[in-house]
Amino acid sequence: MTVLISDAEVAAALDAPTTVDAMRAALLAGHDGQLVAPPRTAASLGGGRMVLTAGHLVGQWYGYRSYDTFGHPGTEQVVVLHDGRTGAVRAVAVGEELGSRRTGGLGGVAVDVLARSDAATLGVIGSGRMAWAQVWAVAAVRPLREVTVHSRSTARRETFAARVRAELGISARAVPTAQAAVCDRDMVVLATTSPAPVLSAADLAPGCHVNAVGFKQRDRAEFATDLLDRAAVLVSDSPAQARSYVPPMLAAEAPYAARLGDLGAVLAGAAAGRTGADQISVFCSVGLAGTEVFLLDRLVRVLTATAPG
């Protein structure tokens, strides 16, 4: 029987440690070839596009996520999980929560792998769903002492800081500038919809780790190449997907492309990550295909394990 899962059910059942653990397993599966995850594809439909990311965990399941760019206020993403042996649809998740938690979980893995082990302060630029998911996941892998947040809306950043205090029990404050948000922070999250840089790399403290979640393409990026120039460690969750962006992704172009590593390879110990306390590390999140389906499979297992009887 197909299980239909709502945002509310995702939020109730998927905690941060479970999500980060699932994304860690997905990245390792991608590295060793068990997770087949080609770059996303899109179909232009006149006025918008349908975008598809698909994945196959060999011998277990396959599935996809679909979303559109028509801009309708009620548009929802759909994630579909098929049984790999029978082809039957095991589960369908409709909404935004699974996708944002997936992205947060990948960011949590990046922090766990690349940030200094003693990192305890986090600066956030952005106050939307994706920014929240990053903080939620980072708090599961580092004992955060304080979060500072900046976004264009005073009300939204104040609300975000209050939510961090209330739901995560972490000291948090809203600040009036991006510089104030990132100054002297051990870790930084960029999660905006800005097509122009919101961060000056000169404001980052030595040893800082950065998760970049928003736009990162040529002529449309929330950071400039000064961040890539400062990065001693530069990785993505899918270098292949990074190379497929149109227009190109900044980190996948010369002179940075040769340095863009694979987070899964670092996680598996097949590639170097941070080797010095003062190095700047940058994770360019692109959303490894198949990870939404991987997380949906994990969610179905959680729901099955907790079902009465």
Image (tube, rainbow, N blue to C red):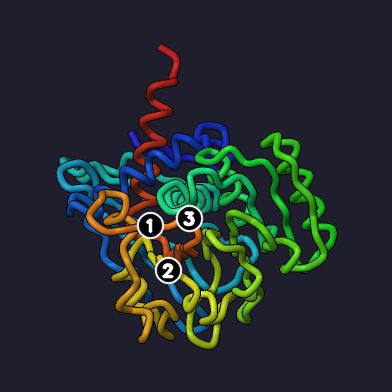
Picture residue at 72% right of the left edge, 54% below the top: 148
Q: Position of residue 288 (x, y in %)?
A: 36, 60
Q: Quick check: 85 above or below 306?
A: below
Residue 184: horizontal and vertical position, in percent? 67, 59
Which residue lies at the image location 48% right of the left edge and 51% below the top edge? 111
From this view, report whether residue 272 is shown above or below residue 231.
above
Amino acid residing under circle 1: Thr
Residue depth check, mark 3 versus mark 2: number of the one nearer the observer: 3
Residue 108 in percent (x, y) is at 48, 48
Q: Name the one closer to the observer, 248 or 46.
A: 248
Q: Element at badge 1?
A: loop
Which element is circle 3 on? loop
Query: Where is mark 3, residue-wise?
Result: 277
Q: Disc 3 marks which amino acid?
A: Ala
Residue highlighted by disc 1: 275
Please state, as top left, top right, bottom left or bottom right, where the N terminus lies in the image: top left
* In this rendering, position of residue 194 left or right of residue 30: right
Residue drawn at (55%, 82%), measured in percent from left and top?
A: 220
Label 3 and label 2: CA atoms lie apart by 11 Å
- Return the disc, 1 or 2, that comes first in the chain's sequence: 2
Measure the C-alpha gap from mark 1 to mark 3: 7 Å
The image shows residue 268, relative to residue 211, as above or below, that is above
Write down the residue under mark 2.
232
Q: Is residue 167 visible?
A: yes
Q: Assign the C terminus to one quadrant of the image.
A: top left
Q: Position of residue 154 (x, y in %)?
A: 84, 62
Nearer to the camera, 132 or 224? 224
Q: What's the CA distance linking mark 1 and mark 2? A: 9 Å
Q: Are marks 1 and 2 in contact (CB under 8 Å)?
A: yes
> Looking at the image, which is closer to me, 187 or 197?
187
